[in-house]
Amino acid sequence: MRNDTEMSEVEAPATEDRRENNEEGRIVSFQEFLEKVHPSVQIAVNDLWRQLKSLNNPNRKAIVFPAIRLHCRTCEGERTFRCLSEESFGWTSDTVNVHPIYRCGDCQQALKHYALQIEFGEAGKGKVYKFGEKPQFGIPVPNRVLRLFGKDAKLFLKGRQCENQGFGIAAFAYYRRVVENHKNDLFDEIIKVCETVNESAELVDELKAAKKQISFAASIDEIKTGLPQGLLIDGHNPLNALHGALSVGLHSESDEDCLQNAQAIRYVLSDLVERIAMLKQDNKELSAAVQRLLAKKKGATD
């Protein structure tokens, strides 16, 4: 990370555009800003900098970069990341551009790059604008979910990108289109699980009948029997949750509401697909264990 004042300045978006992106009245910690605020937003930040003691220049400031919690793609989970230089020393300008680099504290391999513009305020406060970050903002979509959607995985990732940037209507539209297009694939996976764990023939027949319906909403209405316990999320049928989110009128909701619905769709869908994979894996391991025990018993009686 460069700390010298000769760093080339990058022009941020025009003042009018920045004003539209600035979340007025909201003040967050620098840690929360780095972890949870998507790019192209300017927000007031606390505990951003500290005053440096200097006889020659009493206005020198040090930007204090906190430890943060992010998803590590190498470790495949949430980890603590620390800035390679915990403090950026010697700033005297009112506005500076910085490019901090964070590294995962566990694997010591995964890096997170930020491009920020900082406006110093009073008493350690200021405003921070996030030009961007790499890898991109947000937790990556699980590969199991992307495989379910085949060629439409690219559309789902576009929805994720829109969600990362706070474009709720666009994210919701992408997610709803992909889920509706692959309703049958989702039902096929659930049917396979039900057959694998020996669920009732009544439930399997209901799921097969639901699959034949044209819309997702009509499919849900066909299911009268609950799903296997292992597929429930907090005791609730995830298909009902998806139906509730997908049935919202796109043009009657605000962008913020659509963003929340888009996030709900991704959360529930990702969790459901992971639970399907887990049940299939657990049953496979259980069957293998039973076969080993039966083989051992047979060998003992021979």
Image: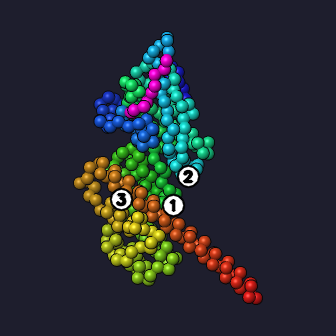
Label 3 and label 1: CA atoms lie apart by 18 Å
Graded by Cα atoms within 10 Å as few (under 14), some (14 to 19) or many (20 or more), the crowding at tag 1 reads: few
Using the rendered view, name the quadrant where residue 104 is placed: top right
Marks 2 and 3: which is nearer the front?
2
**Residue 89's spot in the image, x, y percent?**
51, 23
Against 210, is 262 above or below?
above
Q: Check disc 3 and report the residue beneath it.
A: 176
On the question of residue 17 being in view, the answer is no
Answer yes or no: do the residues labelled 2 and 3 have beta carbons within 8 Å? no
Q: Which residues are magenta?
A: 45-53
Farthest bottom residue in view: 302
Give the residue at mark 2: 76
Earlier in the chain: of badge 3 and badge 1, it is 1
Q: List x then y, in percent, for residue 249.
A: 26, 58
Q: Quadrant of the C terminus?
A: bottom right
Q: Residue at x 44, y 17 (%)?
A: 59
